[in-house]
Amino acid sequence: MSGTAETLLEVRNLSRHFGAHQVLGDVSFDLRRGEILGLLGPNGSGKSTVLNIVSGFLAANGGSIGLNGRPIVNAGPENVTAAGLVRTFQLPSMPRRMTVREVVQAGDATTATLASATRPLRFDNEVDELIAAFNLGPVAGLPASSLSGGQKKLLSVAVALRCRPRILCLDEPTAGVHPNLRAEMVRILRRYNAEGVAMLVVEHDMLFIRDLCHRCVVLDRGEIIADCAPASLEDNPRVVEAYLGKAVEKGKLAS
Amino acid sequence: MSDFLIHVASIACIYGMLALSLNLQMGFTGLVNFGLIALFGCGIYGAALAHVMGWPLIAGLAAALVMAGLLGLFFARLGRRLSSDYWGIATLSIAEVIRITVMNESWTGGAQGISGLTLLFGDLRPWDGLARLGLFALALFATYLLCEKLVRSRFGLAMKLMREEPQLARALGHDINGIRARVMLISAAIAAVAGVLYAHYLTFVGPDQLVSADTFLIWSMVIVGGIANNRGVVVGAVLMQFAMAFVPFAKDLLGLPTDFVAAARLILVGGGILLFLLLKPQGLLPERVGAGK
C-alpha cells in the first residue's frame, strides 16, 4: 500500500485517543485519483474520527496525511480545504438568514476578500450551474435553513463542490434521505466523479456503497479489517462478523 | 429649542455610527461585543491625548485609530480561543478594566478627565451647531455607505456564513480568524472616528463616558432598529437618542424628582431591549434575507 503517482491522499499510521480511550490504533489507507472510496464500520469504529482528522477539524496524536504529496495533518480545516480536500457534515445545519443561492456563492472562499466590497455583489455562473445540477432551482431564493433534510444534504454537497475540490469527503450523505433522492445523489456524484473529483464516503447504506464506491475500507475498533471491492465484502468473515452481521448470508446483499 | 434639537441630532449621528459599528460585529458577523464603549474610548482619549500634547486634531485622529485598531485586534485575538458568549463577557471585562485604569491614572486626567479640547467649527458662531451637525451627518452617511458596501459583497456573505454556521464556513475554507480580525479593525476604526468627533464636540473627555451602560444603550439601538439592517440601526439610534433626550421634559411635565431622569433612561434601555427581544426580535426594520442580487 505504498504511495504511487496514482495516490491522491495518503493516510499513514493515524492514531488518536480521547483520554485513555484509543479511538484509532494505526490506520493507513490510500485514495487514488478518480476513485470513490467507501469508509465503513460499525458505530464507534472511528470512521468519523478519521474524517475529522483528514478534514483538519481534529488533531491526530500520531501519523501523517499527504494530499498530493503535501502534508496536511493538523493543518486546520481552512488550509485543508485550500489544499483541495473538502468535507460535508452528517447533519448539515444551514443558515437561517441566507438564501440557498447565497450559501452556494459563499462556498467559494477564495474571492470573499475585503477587496470584494469595492464591487457590487455578483453571483458566479457556477452557482446557478450547481443549483441546477442538484435540482435546487425552485428553492434557490429561500432561506437555506427552510429546506427539507434531504435538500439540505444536496445543498451541502453542492456547496462543497463550489470549492472545486480534488477530494470530496462525504459524511453519511444519504442518512435520512428518501430512496428516490438517494438514486439522484448517486447519479450526481458519479457525474462529478467522472469530471475528476475523488471521493471518500462514510456511509451505512450498503446499496448506496455498492452503487457508488470503487473500493471499501472497513474499520472496526480503530483498526482497518478489510480493504477490498464492495462486492467482496460479504466474503470476508471479519467484515461479516464486525459489521454486516452474522445473519447476512453470502449473496443476500445482492438481492 | 432649535439649539437643543441640533444638539440631540448631533449626538444621534455619533451614536448612529456606533450602532453601525456594533451592527457589523454583532448583526452581520455574530461577534457579541459588550465592550464596544472601549473602542469609542480610544477615540475620545486619542483626541484628548493630542490636546494634552499640543498636537493637531488630525494627529489625535491618527492616535485614536491606532489605539482602537490595537484594541480591536486584541479583542479579535481573544475570539480565537473563546466561544461567542464567553467572548462577550471578556470584552465587557476588558472595557471595565480600561475604564477603571483611565480613572486612576494621572496621564489620563483621572476622574476629572481632560477638558478644554477645541470645539469643532467654534469660530463659525452662531452657525457652528449646524456646521457640526452637517459634519456628523456626513460622517454617519459615509459610515452607512461603507457598511452597506461591506455586507453586500462576497466578504459580507462570508461574514454572514461565519455568523450562523462557523463550522461550515471553516469547512469551506473561510479563515474565520481573519474575518473576525478584519471586521474588528473596521468597526474599531468607525468607533474611533465617532469618539474623536464626540470629544471635539463636548470639548471634555472623562471616564464617565466609558461606562458599560453606554454599550448597552448602543445595543438597544441595534435591537430596536433591526439587527443586521444598517438603515434600521440608524433609525434605532435616532429614536433611542431622542427618547433619552426627552426624558427630562417628561419629568418636568409629571412633576417628578431629578433622580427620575437617570432611572428612566436605564429603564428605557433595558425595557427597549427586553420588549423588542420578546415581541419583535427582528426590530423595526428586519434584516432583508437575499437582498444581495
Image (spheres, rainbow, N blue to C red):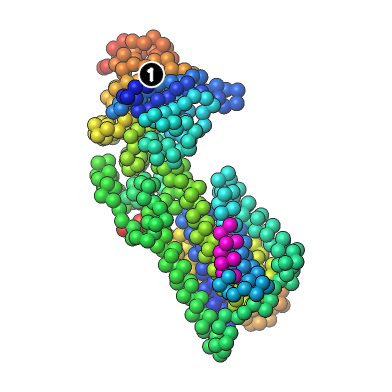
Q: Residue B176: where, in percent of width, then height?
A: 48, 47
B178 or B291: nearer the viewer: B178
Q: Amino acid at mark 1?
A: Ser
Residue displayed at 37% across by 56% down = A116
Give the quarter of the figure containing the C terminus of chain B: bottom left
Q: Quadrant of residue B274?
A: bottom right
The quadrant holding residue B254 is bottom right
Left or right: A1 in relation to B283: left
Which residue position holds label 1? A2
Q: Measured along the vertical axis of the image, is residue A188 above or below residue A115?
A: above
Residue B288 appears in the rendering: no
Asked if A124 appears above or below B136 in the picture, the reply is: above
Image quadrant containing the N terminus of chain B: bottom right
Question: Which secondary structure lies at badge 1?
Answer: loop
Identify the residue at image location x=35%, y=42%: A163
**Could you say which is closer to the camera, residue B168 or residue A183?**
B168
x 51%, y 19%: residue: A25
Residue A173 percent location from the top left of the image? 36, 32
Structural crowding at the residue carrying mark 1, measured as other residues with C-alpha within 10 Å and reported as few (<14), some (14–19) or many (≥20): few
Q: Which residues are magenta?
A: B60-70
Residue at image position (49%, 24%) is A63
Question: Residue B195: horizontal and vertical position, in percent?
Answer: 58, 69
Q: Is residue A103 left or right of residue A21?
A: left
Question: Magenta stretch: residue B69 in it?
Answer: yes
Instruction: Inspect the magenta stretch and tell me whether residue B102 lies in it.
Output: no
Q: Main secondary structure of the magenta part?
A: helix
* Residue lying at the far bottom of the rendered structure: B126
The answer, for residue B140, to whether it is visible in the render is yes
Chain letter of the residue carrying label 1: A
Q: Is residue B73 above or below residue A151?
A: below
